[in-house]
């Protein structure tokens, strides 16, 4: 599980508890202007055979914590979630090392509102695109 906080113009992703050890990372900072879209989901993403866990811990269909090379086309992602995760925030990012951050939080809707409230119109437009299905 992680805690999302806005510090100035950055989103600070603080990894909590044992997940720091499991993911071999304690935090990730992302400029708010680099966030393309935000959404709330649940559970683990669907992995392909070509997806690779680079740093961290992964148990297929149970948990994923750490840095992954996933998707089609492949991109770097930081994941911190389990199959039982109900409040998951998915961030799509541009121009940074991680193109995607998918993490479990205490309250996904509240975390999204906090990010949208601090990022103003850019994030609001991204959130509107998600709601419209673009």
Image (cartoon, rainbow, N blue to C red):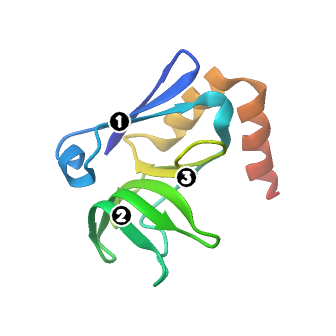
What is the distance, in whole Å, between disc 3 and disc 2 at their CAs?
15 Å
For mark 2, give the secondary structure: strand
Assess whether mark 2 and mark 3 are in contact (beta carbons under 8 angstroms).
Answer: no
Query: Compared with residue 81, is residue 96 higher up or lower down, i.e. above or below?
Result: above
Left or right of residue 60: residue 99: right
What is the distance, in whole Å, between disc 3 and disc 1 at their CAs?
15 Å
The number of discs equals 3
Q: Check disc 1 and report the residue beneath it.
A: 27
For mark 3, give the secondary structure: strand
Going from N to C along the chain, the mark reached first, 3 or 1, is 1
User: 78 or 82, which is in the foreground?
Assistant: 78
Residue drawn at the location 41% of the way across and 72% of the way down: 52
Residue drawn at the location 65% of the way across and 42% of the way down: 95
For mark 1, give the secondary structure: strand
Which percent across, then down, holds residue 126? 75, 42
Query: Compared with residue 18, is residue 4 higher up or lower down, i.e. above or below?
Result: above
Q: Check disc 2 and report the residue beneath it.
A: 54
Q: Check disc 3 and report the residue beneath it.
A: 100
Tell me the mark number nearer the camera, choosing from 1 and 2. Answer: 2
Which percent across, then down, holds residue 103? 42, 50
Going from N to C along the chain, the mark reached first, 3 or 2, is 2
Which percent across, then down, holds residue 26? 28, 38
Extreme residue toward the top, this view = 8
User: 98 or 61, which is in the foreground?
Assistant: 98
Left or right of residue 25: residue 110: right
Going from N to C along the chain, the mark reached first, 1 or 2, is 1
Query: Compared with residue 38, is residue 70 higher up or lower down, i.e. above or below?
Result: below
């Amino acid at each position: 599980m992680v805690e999302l906080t806005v510090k100035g113009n950055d989103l600070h992703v603080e990894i909590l508890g044992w997940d720091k050890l499991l993911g071999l990372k304690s935090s990730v900072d992302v400029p708010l202007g680099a966030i393309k879209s935000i959404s709330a989901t649940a559970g683990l993403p669907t992995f392909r055979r070509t997806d690779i866990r680079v740093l961290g811990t992964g148990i297929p269909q149970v948990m994923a914590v750490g840095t992954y090379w996933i998707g089609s086309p492949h991109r770097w992602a930081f994941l911190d979630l389990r199959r039982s995760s109900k409040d998951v925030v998915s961030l799509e990012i541009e121009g940074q090392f991680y193109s995607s951050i998918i993490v479990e939080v205490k309250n996904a809707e509240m975390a999204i509102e906090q990010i949208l409230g601090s990022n103003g119109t850019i994030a609001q437009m991204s959130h509107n695109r998600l709601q419209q299905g673009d």
